[in-house]
Amino acid sequence: MIGQAVQVLVDAVSVGGLYALTALGIGLIFGVMRLINFAHAQLIMIAGYAVLLFFAQSAVLAVLGAVAGAVLLALLVERMAFRPLRGADPATLLIASFAVNFLIEKVMIMLVGSRPKGVDFLPMLAGQVEIAGVRLQLLQLVTILVSVVLLVATTWFLKSTRLGLEMRAAAENFRMAEVLGIRANRVIASAFAISGLLAAAVACLFVAQTGLVQPRMGLQLVIIAFVGTVIGGLGSLPGAAFGGFLVGVATILLEALLPAELRVFREAFLFLAVAVVLIFRPQGLIPARGLAGRI
């Protein structure tokens, strides 16, 4: 009984870590551009297909290919789609992000088809390890470790490097940051590149867990992570990561705790809980208080 409870908890934390990384990538772009970037789903998708392309050669090459594919696509999207719209109202940017998302998805469907493709990625992580008498899946433990490392590394980068400080300044007051000499193009492109890196990490872990790649693989992750970003505090990076983590944990706990006949309504219970949170905390659990309070 204890072993089963620990296993459910580890599963919940590992899924929460994936959603936290996804929400952090979304929150980072929103912080700099006030753009809710639903095209982030396609960064995860393209990284997944890079894994499919290279995993037969080596796992390292697959990971590097995923990072390169997601970062390059993120930079291309920023340069071709969002840079010309810089300064547009949020509604225009939101519509543009949906347009970019659907365009890339449909192009991929035309090129590779819509059927899922199997990927036996990182099979060495399919085993179990015994900790304090409890057998846990190695892949879930690795997912938790990678999520923690990336979250800590991103926080350190934003707080301790010159480029990170420039991102924080641009997110607080973009026009003032430009007046003070911060180069907007470099800051925004760097934010997109980091979001691509986070998307690649999510894709690699997600593909290792599911063993499948398909053109819509990132959409559900991004939608749920966006919900987490909203309840955590839109514009707050800690809030985005925390909210994404909470939503991920909640999905697994609901799956484990709900009676079998109610599990098909798991998302309904999840969004009901989100609605309750927003009724009492419409600004989110960790609201933005200027960027110094956000990061």
Image (cartoon, rainbow, N blue to C red):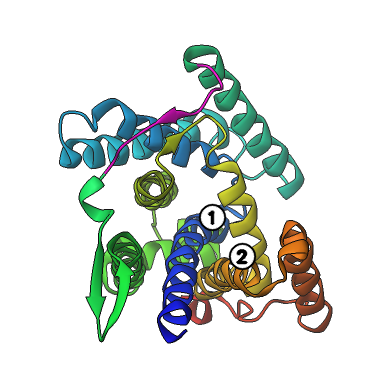
Which residue reaches farthest right? 279
Answer yes or no: is residue 187 visible: no
Q: Secondary structure at mark 2?
A: helix
N-terminal of the pair, mark 1 or mark 2, is 1
Q: Residue at x 79, y 62 (%)?
A: 268
Asked if the residue at tag 2 contacts the one at tag 1, i.e. Cβ–Cβ closer than 8 Å, the answer is: yes
Which residue reaches farthest top? 110
Up-down relation of residue 141 to residue 105 (above or below): below
Query: Which stretch is magenta?
Result: 113-121
In the image, 258 versus 68, the foreground residue is: 258
Q: Quadrant of residue 230?
A: bottom right
Q: Residue at x 52, y 82 (%)?
A: 293
Answer yes or no: is residue 205 visible: yes
Q: How many marks?
A: 2
Q: Secondary structure at mark 1?
A: helix
Give residue 244's position: percent from left, percent from top.
Answer: 56, 66
Q: Which residue is mark 2?
A: 229
Residue 255's disc is none
Q: Residue at x 64, y 45 (%)?
A: 87
Q: Quadrant of residue 249?
A: bottom right
Query: For residue 270: magenta?
Result: no
Q: Work out how far the residue at label 1 is from the one at label 2, CA to CA, in angstroms.
A: 8 Å
In the image, 190 versus 60, the foreground residue is: 60
Q: Residue at x 57, y 57 (%)?
A: 30
Q: Mostly what secondary structure, the magenta segment?
A: loop
Residue 26's disc is 1
Residue density around tag 1, few if under 14, some if 14–19, many if 20 or more, within 10 Å = many
